[in-house]
């Protein structure tokens, strides 16, 4: 079976990040790796979900040392994964049930 990585670009998304993460972890086909790429958030986005993600072994958090433009953030995040397929989503979006099976 092909492997799947999901990259979530986080930029001041405290109001939406929880729904985004829930939509990813509640898929019937689980992502092999989920990378939360914190791109210089200053609104406590990660604090909103830290306890929620603690028990998921497939979730890693990457903290960018500087805020990058969106393209650079995505390109940097892609270097962190090794799966066959990759979905990149902003922390203000979400995926519908069954999306990873398509």
Image: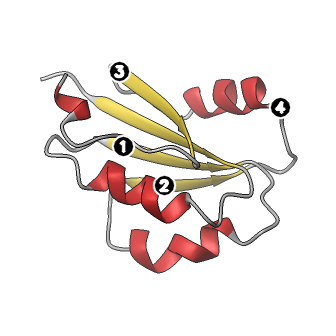
Residues at marks 1 and 4, CA–CA distance in whole angstroms: 23 Å
**At 77% from the left edge and 69% from the top edge, which residue is drawn?**
43
- In front here: 61 or 6? 6
**Label 1, residues with CA under 10 Å away: few <14, some 14-19, many ≥20:** many
Residue 33: image tag: 1
From this view, report whether residue 13 is shown above or below residue 78: below
Residues at marks 2 and 4, CA–CA distance in whole angstroms: 21 Å
**Label 4, residues with CA under 10 Å away: few <14, some 14-19, many ≥20:** few
For the residues bearing labels 1 and 2, Cβ distance under 8 angstroms = yes
From this view, report whether residue 76 is shown above or below residue 60: above
Q: In the visual, does 17 lie left or right of 71?
A: left
Residues at marks 4 and 3, CA–CA distance in whole angstroms: 23 Å
Residue 11: image tag: none
**At 30% from the left edge and 30% from the top edge, which residue is drawn?**
4
Furthest-bottom residue in this view: 51
Element on which disc 1 rests? strand
């Amino acid at each position: 079976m092909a492997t799947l990585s999901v990259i979530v670009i986080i930029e001041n998304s405290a109001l939406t990040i929880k729904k985004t993460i829930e939509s990813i972890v509640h898929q019937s086909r689980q992502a092999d790796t989920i990378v939360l790429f914190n791109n210089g958030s200053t609104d406590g986005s990660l604090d909103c979900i830290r306890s929620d993600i603690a028990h998921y072994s497939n979730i890693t958090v990457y903290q960018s040392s500087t805020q990058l433009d969106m393209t650079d953030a995505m390109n940097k995040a892609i270097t962190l994964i090794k799966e066959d397929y990759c979905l990149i989503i902003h922390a203000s979006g979400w995926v519908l049930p069954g999306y990873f099976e398509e």
